[in-house]
Amino acid sequence: MTLSSQSLAEDKAESFDIHKTVPSGVFSPNGMVATSEPLAVDIGLDILKKGGNAIDAAIAVNAALGLMEPTGSGIGGDLFAIVWSAKDKKLYGLNASGYAPSELSFHKLQSELKRLNRDDIPPFGMLPITVPGAVDGWFELHSRFGSLSMADILAPAIHYAKEGFPVTPVIAKHWWWGVYWLTGQPGSFVDTFTINGKAPKAGEIFRNPDLARTYQIIADKGRDAFYKGSIAKQIDEFMRKEGGFLRFSDLAAFRSEWVEPVSTNYRGFDIWELPPNGQGITVLQMLNILEGYDLSAMERDSGELLHLMIEAKKLAFEDRARFYADTYFRKLPIKGLLSKDYARSRRGLIGDHAAQRIDAGNPYLYKGDTVYITTADSEGNMVSLIQSNYRGMGSGVVVPGLGFTFQDRGQLFSMDPDHANVYAPRKRPFHTIIPAFMTKNRKPLMSFGLMGGAMQPQGHVQVLVNLIDLGMNLQEAGDNPRWRHDGSSEPTGKHNAYTEGGGKVMIEPGFSPSTAEDLELRGHKVKESDFGFGGYQAIWFDEKAGGYYGATERRKDGKVEGY
């Protein structure tokens, strides 16, 4: 069913009323914090109550998560953020993702891979390590928007790193897997992240005195201590000794980049993401395709609805695999990818039956595990921030005495010399982590995100369709069962084992048997699963009520709180 005119979309936007859809109990007039670990939420709220703003709170929460949820975050990883500045009445985007080491050339990397008898970059060890961008991201955010001192912001995380904190159940489960996979990597992973050689159990008190010292140095001496000072020198010395490639010069030269968020209008709402090297515009491409269907007329638990969303995902992900990369190294057709005309041409490829093979389009013809944090304050500032080691606890490489593991984001480079995302020194790899924001009539509405690798854009779209098309409230939009399509081509240049043949559709428990049967009749390969559907957090600003509504993920340990 396609839309007969744009008026239906406009009517949908005008009829959307947050007061009808959000439970009155999830409301705060002064400020709000939502993330995946309860104690980290409390830390963010304390920062707000002490006079800090949403930016201060987001940094404090991120520092706490690097300690309390090292299975998805830490200062060895990267950071992306979208900030609504109430003073400026505009959105700012920050790309704090690091690049590949300068001493590891493409040919040197090829030689290293040949020695390991593989043709792609491994997930662990020295080869996938790229410059960590998170600390510089903190200081960029703080210098432009911060209120409290960095010493005050980092003090709670330093305290808990010294004194300890209770590990929560979901994190404990992922921690066990991290220890299982990463024991044996260069450095002090076991000494840093285990208790007597074992992963901490749920409820067990964990301490990280090395990270406390690292945080204290950063609090006292600033970002340069990490990139040009004692920490950078310690990293360089260790990498040279252990056969790694990251150097002092790579750290010293790194700077985050302020970027313009990009958007599309979906039924009267402006949805904002960050441009590549991340995958955020996949969300916008999917929405542009789906805009041509009256999804509100469909049942939320139906094969018809899921089929259209899955096929839109397949189309957008093939473009993602071919075109998304570091814009410093390749001019990308972003305007074409986001063109409504291009979406219309791609939409025409969707039929009643699951596509068994899809290729990337030609946008040049058209000019047109991870942690997520969202915070808001009494001034109207809102932050959408996502930060990650990439794959769980990252590379497993820990410099003795520093208390954090390095990310393995470099695994997402392609080794195909003709690919846009091909590996190169000082190049940023394709990134999966994406913060998001929604506005209407140039006013802020929602800061939101959904962690989980390739699930992230699929989850963003499902949340938005649940809210805008299906009339769910903010919490229900995240609680509703999710689907995930696996099997699209990858930005590494690799095809999944089941790319040919349409891939697989994973659905959570909660969908009716008839929906799964309908999808199978349409040619989809369907399997039920209870793992890998991401983690959602959201804060909605209600100008009329003068405060915020919040929602948190039922699949995580986290919570949302305000005051």
Image (spheres, rainbow, N blue to C red):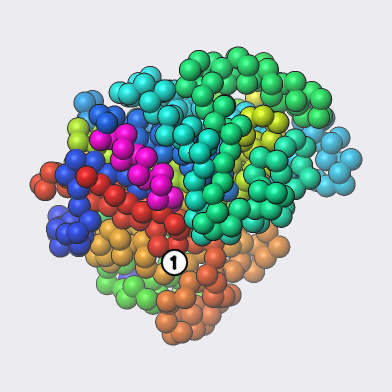
The residue that appears at 35% across and 39% down in the rendered structure is: 44
Q: Nearer the viewer, residue 377 or 122?
A: 377
Q: Quadrant of the C terminus?
A: top left
546 relative to 480, above or below = above
Give the farthest residue toward the left: 544
Judged left or right of residue 282, residue 408 is right
Quadrant position of the N terminus in the picture:
bottom left
Q: Say which residue appears at 37% left-offset and 76% top-offset.
A: 301
Q: Is residue 41 magenta?
A: yes
User: Label 1 neighbourhood size at 10 Å, few (<14), some (14-19), many (20+)?
Assistant: many
Q: In the figure, is residue 408 to the left or right of 55?
A: right
* Residue at the image position 70 percent from the left and 31 percent from the top: 400
Question: At numbered mark 1, what does the secondary structure look like: helix, strand or loop?
Answer: loop
Residue 216 is situated, as x and y percent measured from the top left of the image, at: 51, 24
Rendering quarter of residue 356: bottom right
Of 223 and 130, which appears nearest the observer?
223
Question: In the rendered structure, does residue 492 fall within the stretch colored magenta?
Answer: no
The one nearer the camera, 323 or 450, is 450
Q: Is residue 60 left or right of residue 134?
A: left
For mark 1, what is the residue?
A: 482
- Residue 114: tell me if it is visible: yes
Image height of 200 relative to 486, above or below: above
Query: Compared to 399, does 202 lie above or below?
Result: below
Q: Residue at x 67, y 29 (%)?
A: 401
Residue 14 is situated, as x and y percent measured from the top left of the image, at 15, 55
Magenta stretch prevailing secondary structure: helix
The region drawn magenta spans 36-49
Q: Can residue 442 be seen? A: no
Residue 184 coordinates in the image, percent (x, y): 79, 45
Pinpoint residue 56: horizontal percent, then vertical percent. Answer: 35, 30
Q: Amino acid at mark 1?
A: Arg
